């Protein structure tokens, strides 16, 4: 009964209600769409980081976190690791790596870089490095290296150029070795394009005097959302002396970024909804005023104050919820229309400095709907407060006397 | 006051509660828009300021081809001619000569690749923040004695090497002659920098020491030049271009911060785009609120409008009256909004507030200091006010057309 009255009241002045609904749905649709694009940018940043070598999970020897040096190494050899990793079904692919710092020099220049020794075939499965070869080929033959195009241009190196890597080996001695450029990477990632030099694992192990030891194992799992569970499984099945960490623990800044995105989303929704609340309150107030006589009549025939208030609140809730539904629907249509992404590379192609891709793809999670729903409900109640009070407090006799 | 204006003003206050709500919505929107824009302007200015004061200033002079290769091979001849030319330019706030290259820095059995910058400490203090960012120990001495080789390390680099003040570290690099260069240096200080990448990757020595280490003689790699403000960088560049015209200029290249850090400029652009979209949504919502208020005011006066028309007021006058109502409504809201927004912002202008929690950590990704700053540029309130005026004009269009098209007889008959 109350519901039916509220519903009919709403459509008494369809034009007025339509304007309010348009305002709410345009506002919400805009929020949903811009939030989705923002989230897409961030998901893209995380994906880029994961694909450029971070992986989902990394295994290191104890102490890597404080001191990522050659001496902190995994010496188990490949076989025991392989069997432990292969026995966990969620581990999709894994690859061993050796990580070290060094200086790479051509006849023209020298640059400080990170040197990564990789198993060429296994690395192909965990990072985009092998698939981002722009010129030449990926590692295969011994005594070859692969580097990014920006680094190559700084060194004036081409395919076949001989480069010398100088570094400190495990024992602390300065060591050096010449390698020929096998391939040049172009990956729109600052690290891959400008900071890393890839060697075959065997070459890196011999350069650094590491024997069979490696620095880390990188793992790509079936499901990024469930890395925590897989991490526990791995930690219990591996020998002590090694630590298993997820990408969230390895790159906490990425997680902070997503968290600060969430608080930003709340602020944005709150601002838009407050602006809406004024509009909704205005319309309701008008509706209550023009019905003063009618409300007086209802009170006179025995409708309680509480029910009058409930009716007004219900009207407000109905408007807000319909607007919210339309807005979210419209926003989702927008997200769907933009599913291929917005290409901004023509005017913003250098964002890979910050790990941002130049195609903005909107992305949504179910929990992104919580903020608009909660704030929407709050708005409905807040904006109906004054009109409802006004309607509920009206004395039947006064109200009937007016107009 | 003519009749329309008087009618409009009285109409606005006919239902004070309704007007109050619409005005409140306008005030809220204007205050929010002005504050958001001033926050963005503040943080963007700070981003640029931080970035140029941790890199090569607003404009850098270097040997032709240096920005591309970043190697010692491209150099600026440091024989007094460049110095004299820079001194001639008026818009230079400060300048500092540099020798930038790479070296492997090692202590014991730990080593790390790092950028090595040779600086003139006094001049550098005017251009970058490296000197003031020393968190432990001191900066390298202005006048190093013969054989004294001091070095200041980025905090994270020192941590990784396990280096403390007083330790001797080995720098291993490639000299200008392409021969290997290595030398022991004494760590005299560490720097805490807002950019973690730089903290891991920066080693500073004295210009003369760097020159000796890289056997660079009377050459340097670049001169970092600071303009009075980021806005004057382009003017500075133009002035330097004219100063360097001639044979000396042919050996050199000039780059401003926008060219050296295109990613930063684009990050600001994309950040601005996101904010303006949000503000646009907000203003549209408020616009619909104004539309509804005016529309309601017209609809409930249908009979009255009919009478006015029947008495001979021209439809165009009615249109003007409705428009005036909408302008007055917006005008009152804008005046109150400006009164609320401007005084606190004028007071906050330029102040910095430290950020906490996740937000502080998130700013680190972009190499920014975790502080909140406000910057009030005159164009901000002007632009914000004009936008809302335009939205109010658009919102009044439909009600005004509706009012002026009313047919007197129909209008009188309705209700």
Image (cartoon, rainbow, N blue to C red):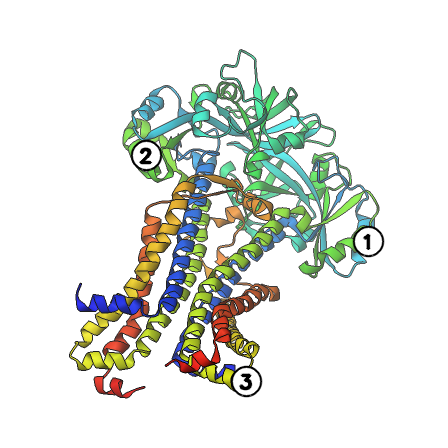
Q: Is residue B390 left or right of residue A347?
A: left
Q: Disc 1 marks which residue?
A: A84
- Per the rendering, the mark at residue A302 is 3
- Per the rendering, the mark at residue B236 is 2
Task: Please check whether the numbered discs 3 and 1 fall on a single chain.
Answer: yes
Query: Which chain letter matches label 3?
Result: A
Quadrant for residue A378, please give it: bottom right
Mark 1 residue element: helix
Looking at the image, which residue sits at the far front? A397
Mark 3 residue element: loop
Q: Earlier in the sequence, mark 3 or mark 1?
A: 1
Q: Are marks 1 and 2 in contact (CB under 8 Å)?
A: no
Query: Which chain letter matches label 2?
Result: B
Q: Quadrant of the N terminus of chain A?
A: bottom right
Q: Are marks 2 and 3 in contact (CB under 8 Å)?
A: no
**Disc 1 versus disc 2: distance between alpha carbons?**
63 Å
Q: Looking at the image, can residue B111 be seen?
A: no
The residue nearer to you, when weighing B75 against B164, is B164
Q: Is residue A159 left or right of residue A343?
A: right
Task: Please check whether the numbered discs 1 and 2 fall on a single chain.
Answer: no
- Above or below, A368 relative to A104: below
Q: Are marks 3 and 1 in contact (CB under 8 Å)?
A: no
* Residue B297: image location, x then y, percent: 33, 74
**Disc 3 versus disc 1: distance between alpha carbons?**
76 Å
The residue nearer to you, when weighing A76 against B51, is B51
Query: Which chain letter matches label 1?
Result: A
* Residue A392: image location, x then y, percent: 51, 75
């Amino acid at each position: 009964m109350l519901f039916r009255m509220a519903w009919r009241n709403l459509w008494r002045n369809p034009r007025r209600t339509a304007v309010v609904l348009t305002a709410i749905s345009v506002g919400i649709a805009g929020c949903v769409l811009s939030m989705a694009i923002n989230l897409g940018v961030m998901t893209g940043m995380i994906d880029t980081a994961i694909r450029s070598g971070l992986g989902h999970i990394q295994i290191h020897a104890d102490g890597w976190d404080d001191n990522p040096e050659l001496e902190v190494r995994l010496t188990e050899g490949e076989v025991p690791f392989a069997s432990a990793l292969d026995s966990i079904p969620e581990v999709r692919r894994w690859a061993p790596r050796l990580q070290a710092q060094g200086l790479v020099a051509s006849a023209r220049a020298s640059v400080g870089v990170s040197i990564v020794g990789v198993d060429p075939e296994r690395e192909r499965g965990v990072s985009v490095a092998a698939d981002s070869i722009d010129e030449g080929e990926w590692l295969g033959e011994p005594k070859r290296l692969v580097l990014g195009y920006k680094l190559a241009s700084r060194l004036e190196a081409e395919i076949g150029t001989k480069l010398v890597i100088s570094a400190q080996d495990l024992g602390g001695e300065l060591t050096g070795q010449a390698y020929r450029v096998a391939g040049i990477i172009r990956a729109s990632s600052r690290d891959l394009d400008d900071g890393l030099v890839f060697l075959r694992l065997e070459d890196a192990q011999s350069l650094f005097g590491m024997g069979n030891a490696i620095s880390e194992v990188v793992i790509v799992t079936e499901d990024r959302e469930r890395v925590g569970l897989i991490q526990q499984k791995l930690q219990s099945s591996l020998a002590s002396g090694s630590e298993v960490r997820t990408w969230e623990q390895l790159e906490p800044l990425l997680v902070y970024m997503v968290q600060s995105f969430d608080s930003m989303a709340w602020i944005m929704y709150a601002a838009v909804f407050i602006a809406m609340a004024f509009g909704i309150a205005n319309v309701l107030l008008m509706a209550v005023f023009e019905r003063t006589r009618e409300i007086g009549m209802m009170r006179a025939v025995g409708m309680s104050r509480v029910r009058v208030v409930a009716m007004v609140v219900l009207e407000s809730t109905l408007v807000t919820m319909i607007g919210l539904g339309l807005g979210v629907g419209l926003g989702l249509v927008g997200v769907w229309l933009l599913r291929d992404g917005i290409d901004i590379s023509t005017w913003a192609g250098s964002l890979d400095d910050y790990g941002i891709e130049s195609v903005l793809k909107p992305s949504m999670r179910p929990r992104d709907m919580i903020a608009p729903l909660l704030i929407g409900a709050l708005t409905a109640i807040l904006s109906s407060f004054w009109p409802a009070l006004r309607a509920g407090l009206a004395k039947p006799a006064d109200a009937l006397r007016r107009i | 006051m003519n009749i329309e204006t008087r009618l409009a003003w009285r109409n606005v206050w006919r239902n004070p509660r309704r007007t109050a709500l619409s005005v409140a919505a306008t005030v809220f929107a204007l205050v929010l828009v002005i504050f958001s824009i001033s926050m963005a302007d503040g943080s963007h200015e700070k981003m640029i300021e931080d970035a140029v004061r941790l890199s090569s200033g607003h404009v850098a002079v270097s040997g032709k081809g240096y920005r591309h290769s970043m190697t010692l091979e491209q150099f600026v001849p440091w024989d007094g001619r460049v110095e004299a030319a820079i001194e001639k330019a008026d818009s230079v706030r400060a300048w500092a000569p540099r020798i930038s290259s790479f070296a492997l820095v090692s202590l014991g059995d730990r080593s790390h690749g790092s950028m090595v910058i040779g600086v003139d400490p006094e001049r550098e203090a005017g251009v970058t923040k490296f000197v003031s960012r020393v968190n432990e120990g001191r900066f390298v001495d202005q006048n190093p004695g013969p054989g004294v080789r001091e070095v200041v390390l980025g905090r994270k680099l020192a941590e990784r090497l396990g280096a403390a003040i007083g330790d001797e570290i080995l720098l291993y690099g490639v000299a200008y002659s392409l021969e290997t260069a290595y030398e022991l240096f004494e760590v005299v200080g560490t720097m805490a920098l807002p950019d973690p990448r730089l903290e891991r990757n920066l080693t500073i020595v004295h210009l003369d020491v760097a020159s000796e280490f890289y056997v660079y003689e009377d050459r340097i790699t670049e001169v970092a030049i600071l303009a009075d403000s980021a806005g004057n960088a382009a003017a500075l560049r133009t002035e330097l271009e004219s100063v360097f015209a001639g044979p000396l200029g042919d050996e050199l290249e000039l780059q401003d911060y926008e060219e050296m850090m295109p990613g930063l400029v684009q990050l600001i652009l994309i950040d601005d785009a996101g904010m303006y979209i949000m503000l646009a949504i907000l203003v549209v919502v408020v616009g619909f609120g104004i539309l509804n208020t005016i529309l309601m005011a017209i609809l409930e006066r249908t009979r009255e409008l009919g009478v006015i028309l029947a008495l001979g007021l021209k439809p165009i006058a009615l249109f003007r009256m409705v428009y005036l109502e909408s302008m007055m409504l917006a005008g009152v809201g804008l005046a109150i909004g400006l009164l609320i927004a401007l005084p606190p912002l004028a007071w906050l202008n330029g102040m910095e507030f430290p950020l906490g929690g996740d937000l502080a950590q998130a700013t680190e990704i972009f190499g920014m200091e975790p502080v909140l700053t406000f910057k009030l540029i005159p164009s901000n309130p002007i632009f914000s006010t004009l936008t809302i005026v335009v939205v109010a004009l658009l919102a009044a269009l439909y009600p005004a057309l509706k009012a002026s098209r009313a047919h007197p007889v129909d209008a009188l008959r309705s209700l």
